[in-house]
Image: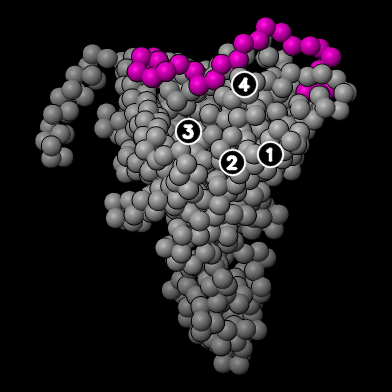
């Protein structure tokens, strides 16, 4: 349907809505629509991936299966790269980070391409064994759905931001059948703050997606039957919290080190071959790294850890060495983040959410088995699997409440609330000490976008610094004479003048106030140069500097304007009055 025809169709409906439906009820109705759409998208992606995986797995004879698992990941990454290049113009924007940027800097406007790009690319990647999770792509798809439905139905800027959160909450709720965790994920990860009335649309959207998921898809992914936990195990829970915190720091640092490595990697085809071959080798040696790995978590929860060795080259030795299982578990635990990074870095699509759950489950089992082998105090290995998932997720994503309620909901382990609180809080606090920003926000902060800081920083983060740069300051050259400078003063509207060389590099500043006395010394009009009168700037601003830091510099130096430079080149000036005026405008938009 042409765009003009669509607007003619929806225009009367929107007009009728303004006359008969108040804003609060309208927002609830739209949140239900977002929940249905995100729930259907989550069910479609999850079920199609699992069906396709089963087909690919059963298609190959058992004796050749290990070689198929070696080649499948490279094929999946290659198909994803081809889809990205020819269907998306070479741009995919993976993960939750771009959504947070859309909220902070682009008025919660998420590109329409994300309605399908994340789902298709992650389907191709994970179906063929890419070692990453589907949670981030589903959450991004839900967020895009919320944003674009909000744009079509003409909701306000703040309501559109809420609908982005509704879509993300609905996606997580649908994929795990966990409505409370979906809401908390939106609050902790997607939305930096939330007023109480906005909880209702989030809850309704998340609950709607869960109903859709339960109606069309199987129930919760994991099952844990437990009724109690021993008080004597609290010290071991604290130990697990420390262990998962160190594991979280390890995963975050490996993730960003790998990101830098693949950014410098030459050639798309080389990257696909290198990544696919590397991932194939890891899967060949350690089959648990194939795909999301939730089947491995299910084995651990069923008390069948020996299944991790099945199908691997170590299977023939499993009855001869009691340490072999722990070696496979530890190796798979440490290599999972590498497998995920290789999958994403070489061109595939997926997220760290599922990888965190997988790694935490293996870490919890490993620590529990070592404690039991030591004879210190007998602990439940199944409990530690569940608690390890929560602790690692809380550390990597920096969302402890999401981790607590997600694990409680997807495992049915509500009796473990206190141990979950102990492990997640300790893991989160220790991780945050070493890594102040999560796997989703660290890269944004490096670009000057602070999503979850205080309100002032959050509002300033929504402003684009370069858009506030003033370019009406007249530049002068060091060899300009005093007489020429006087003539420039007569026609200028500013009393501050940047001094730049022939390459437009900033070398100093001339202020009318500081050279006022020299202006009346006409005897030196031809013998005094700007280079004799200029002073170095008290501070300079880089484009990536945050506006809050810029204001702090202005306060510290008692300056009303600071020059902006990039690689030494002069770009313009940032004025305190301009920053504060735009801050006030942004604040008014937020409270409308």
Q: In this view, does 78 lie to the left or right of 500?
A: left
Q: Identify residue for label 1.
A: 317
- Location of residue 359 in the rendering, given as x and y in whole percent from the top left corner: 63, 36
Determine the secondary structure under disc 1. Answer: helix
Give the distance between the C-alpha atoms of the residues marked 2 and 3, in whole angstroms. 27 Å
- The mark that comes first in sequence, 1 or 2, is 2
* Discs 2, 3 touching: Cβ within 8 Å: no
Q: Identify residue for label 3.
A: 135
* Quadrant (top left/top right/bottom left/bottom right) for the C terminus: top left
Name the image colouring.
one colour
- Location of residue 544 in the rendering, given as x and y in whole percent from the top left corner: 56, 57
Determine the secondary structure under disc 2. Answer: loop
Q: Identify residue for label 2.
A: 312
Q: Which portion, as a residue range, is magenta?
A: 209-237
Badge 2 density bin: few <14, some 14–19, many ≥20, Cα 10 Å: some
Q: Residue 301 carries which label?
A: 4
Q: Residue at x 62, y 54 (%)?
A: 257
Q: Is residue 576 left or right of residue 303?
A: left
Give the distance between the C-alpha atoms of the residues marked 4 and 3, in whole angstroms. 21 Å
* Discs 4, 1 touching: Cβ within 8 Å: no
Determine the secondary structure under disc 4. Answer: helix
Which image quarter: residue 147?
A: top left
- The mark that comes first in sequence, 3 or 1, is 3
- The mark that comes first in sequence, 4 or 2, is 4
């Amino acid at each position: 349907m042409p765009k003009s025809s669509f607007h003619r169709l929806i225009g009367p409906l929107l007009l009728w809505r303004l006359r008969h439906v108040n804003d609060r009820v309208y927002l609830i109705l739209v949140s239900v629509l977002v929940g249905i759409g995100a729930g259907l998208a989550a069910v479609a992606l999850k079920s199609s991936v699992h069906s396709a995986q089963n087909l690919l797995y059963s298609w190959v004879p058992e004796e050749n299966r290990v070689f198929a698992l070696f080649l499948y990941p490279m094929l999946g990454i290659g198909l994803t790269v081809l889809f990205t290049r020819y269907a998306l113009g070479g741009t995919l924007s993976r993960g939750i980070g771009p959504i947070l940027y859309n909220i902070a800097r682009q008025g919660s406007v998420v590109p329409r391409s994300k309605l399908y790009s994340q789902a298709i690319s992650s389907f191709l990647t994970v179906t063929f064994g890419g070692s990453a999770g589907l949670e981030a792509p589903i959450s991004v798809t839900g967020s895009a759905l919320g944003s674009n439905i909000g744009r079509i139905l003409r909701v306000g800027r703040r309501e559109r931001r809420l609908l982005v959160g509704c879509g993300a909450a609905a996606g997580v709720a649908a994929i795990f059948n966990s409505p409370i965790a979906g809401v908390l994920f939106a609050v902790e990860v997607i939305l930096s703050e939330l007023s109480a009335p906005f909880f209702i649309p989030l809850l309704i959207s998340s609950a709607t997606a869960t109903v859709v998921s339960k109606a069309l898809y199987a129930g919760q992914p994991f099952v844990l039957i437990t009724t109690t936990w021993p008080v004597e195990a609290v010290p071991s829970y604290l130990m697990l919290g420390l262990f998962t915190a160190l594991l979280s720091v390890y995963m975050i640092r490996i993730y960003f080190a790998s990101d830098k490595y693949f950014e410098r990697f030459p050639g798309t085809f080389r990257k696909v071959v290198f990544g696919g071959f590397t991932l194939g080798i890891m899967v060949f040696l350690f089959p648990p790294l194939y795909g999301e790995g939730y089947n491995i978590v299910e084995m651990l929860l069923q008390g069948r850890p020996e299944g991790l060795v099945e199908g691997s080259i170590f299977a023939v030795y499993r009855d001869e060495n009691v340490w072999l299982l722990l070696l496979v578990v530890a190796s798979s635990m440490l290599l999972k983040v590498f497998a995920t990074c290789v999958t994403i870095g070489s061109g595939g699509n997926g997220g760290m959410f599922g990888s965190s759950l997988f790694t935490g489950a293996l870490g919890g089992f490993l620590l529990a088995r070592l404690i039991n082998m030591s004879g210190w105090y007998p602990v439940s290995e199944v409990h530690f699997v569940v608690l390890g998932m929560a602790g690692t997720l809380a550390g990597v994503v920096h969302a402890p409440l999401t981790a607590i309620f997600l694990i409680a909901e997807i495992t049915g382990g509500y009796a473990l609330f206190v141990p979950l609180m102990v492990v997640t809080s300790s893991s989160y606090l220790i991780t945050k000490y070493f890594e102040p920003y999560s796997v989703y926000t660290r890269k944004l902060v490096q670009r000057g976008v602070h999503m979850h800081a205080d309100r002032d920083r959050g509002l300033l983060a929504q402003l684009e610094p370069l858009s506030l740069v003033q370019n009406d300051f007249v530049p002068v050259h060091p060899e300009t004479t005093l007489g020429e400078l006087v003539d420039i003063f007569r026609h200028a509207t500013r009393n501050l003048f940047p001094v730049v060389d022939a390459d437009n590099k900033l070398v100093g500043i001339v202020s009318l106030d500081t050279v006022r006395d020299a202006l009346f010394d006409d005897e030196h009009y031809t013998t005094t140069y700007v280079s004799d009168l200029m002073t170095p700037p008290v501070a300079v601003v880089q484009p990536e500097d945050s506006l809050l830091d810029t204001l702090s510099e202005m306060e510290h130096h008692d300056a009303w304007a600071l020059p902006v430079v990039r690689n030494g080149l002069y770009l313009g000036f940032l004025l305190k009055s301009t920053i504060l005026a735009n801050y006030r405008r942004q604040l008014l938009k937020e409270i409308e």
